[in-house]
Amino acid sequence: MNRKENIRQLKTETFDVCVIGGGASGAGAALDAVTRGLKVALIERKDFASETSSRSTKLIHGGVRYLEQAFKNLDLGQLRQVKHGLEERRFVLRNAPHLAHPLALITPVFNAFEAAYFSAGLLLYGLFAKNDSLPKAKWLNKKKTFEKIPTLSKTVHSSVMYYDGQLDDARYCLALAHSADEAGAATLNHAALAGFTKDENGKILSAIVKSQLPEEHGMEIEIKAKIFVNCTGPFSDAVRMMANSEEKARIIPSKGVHILIPKEFLPGKEAMLIPKTKDGRVVFVIPFENKVMVGTTDTPYHELEKEPILESDEVDYLLETMGPFFSKLPERKDILSGFGGLRPLISEKGSNPNDTKSLLRDHAVEIDEKSGLISLLGGKWTTYRLMGQDVIDAVCKELKVAAKSQTKEYYLVGGENYRSDNYQNLMNTYALPEDVAKHVSGKYGDMAEKVLALTHFDESLTQRLHADYPFTGAEVVYTVREEMAVSLRDFFARRTRFELLSWEDAKESIPKVADLMGEELGWTPEQKSANITAYSNEISHFQIQAGVA
């Protein structure tokens, strides 16, 4: 992903389609378009996956709660959503096997009636997953339940175990953008849409994009394309109204938060579903990167100009929700980190805008006849590929192009030659500790050799960034050169997931990363110092707001 070359292309060439928004839906749409033979531009105002797409529960699923609501309310929309999710789940797992894998989830119950109820529901859930190799749901007695999760409350009667998938959402989204780039799309992060130029009838002719990087201060690009596609998730309405001021808002953002706690609270490899909360949601307790992630909440969010972050009362809610299910609860001092994110829910006429739990996570493609803007609205991570296919189908119809989607079985960067035991060869070839080899293989797939080859030229790049984590200096250099990482947070929050795993440990490692990144990007001593201070202060702010400073 060559930033300078892509900027040259964006400045000088005309595109069939310009996709605005570098999250899962935008990167997925760009990949779908370029693999159909279209000439594609992809722009993102911050970093790829920097908003919704790096802040999910990291599950690939149809949605067990949606299935329950579908039958309780005779809601075909919810049922369709589950069907879409379970159909797409297998493609998400197949196309990036280094970044996505099956995950067993255990639902504890407190009596025989609950056991029968959830067994029936989860068996039905499995029936919707056609052509799927994942195991079907099964009931576990108390003994087997505690063998899986020994930290459960002794009042638990038994459990039901079923399967969904898990992914590293930020790196999966990056793999989509990277794959689009390799296929010929001109991709650019940290480039914000500032406005459109239009003809006398209001049709969009070009997009004006401004760099958000201090070192590119004042750089402005006019991107010319035949069609412009809005894939900005919770921010879709702002782009829609920029294209046509007469448009009405359709998106109701909903905030969800997660906390990270030590592995000891869920020591096994299985995840857990808390099937009911005081506000009618479900909460997941999930192993992630040798930590445990707990979430999520669902509350309306109206301050789109501010990053949604974990607040102290939300920590209390999640800890309280865990209460009936665990023999020992984490305390506030056990909170390692946390994050908030926004869901781009589409409102229905007559719906309560503050009742976000009732809104669908399905998607819609909207074409504004006046401006020509095509907007992809709503959706969720699991169905990103279908969303991209649907919106590019609309683009092709407008362009009168007959090409069909190629993405159902299209390996993403790092996926095609990945095997789960590849790490063993890396251990032998590069004399790596097992945890480092597994990490590099699991995050970069068949590109791992390219990451580690950097150590042949500089042996110091084998050194860990922190003694307790498998991240090394080679990753910093590689992500700058090959994955368009241009800020400390790009690296800590999305190229690796260090920011999610421990705020305190991430802060401790900032100077090392800044040294390597600064050398690659040509930062002056003053720029490096300013970047270190700014990012350290940002993490401290997260800690204070969460009440764990």
Image (spheres, grey):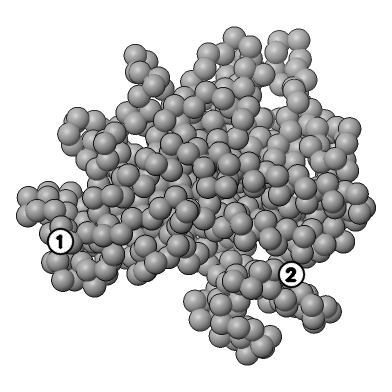
211 relative to 442, above or below: above
* Residue marked by disc 2: 473
Is 214 positioned to the left or the right of 149 in the image? Answer: right
Position of residue 346 measured from the top left corner of the image (x, y, whole percent): 44, 26
Q: Distance between the residues labelled 2 and 1?
A: 46 Å
**Residue at left offset 64%, top offset 47%:** 539
- Furthest residue to the left? 112
Q: Can residue 417 be seen in this view?
A: no
Q: Which amino acid does label 2 sit on?
A: Gly
Is 164 positioned to the left or the right of 302 in the image? Answer: left
Which structural element holds mark 2? helix
Mark 1 neighbour class, 10 Å CA radius: few under 14, some 14 to 19, many 20 or more:
many
Q: Quadrant of the N terminus?
A: bottom right
Please report whichever mark, 2 or 1, sits nearer to the chain's N-terminal start.
1
Is 2 positioned to the left or the right of 127 in the image? Answer: right
**Residue at left offset 64%, top offset 46%:** 540
Q: What residue type is labelled 1?
A: Ser
Closer to us: 438 or 94: 438
**Residue at left offset 38%, top offset 55%:** 330
Position of residue 86 measured from the top left corner of the image (x, y, whole percent): 34, 50
Callouts 2 and 1 close, C-beta under 8 Å: no
103 relative to 393, above or below: below
The image quarter in which residue 102 lies: bottom left
Numbered label tally: 2
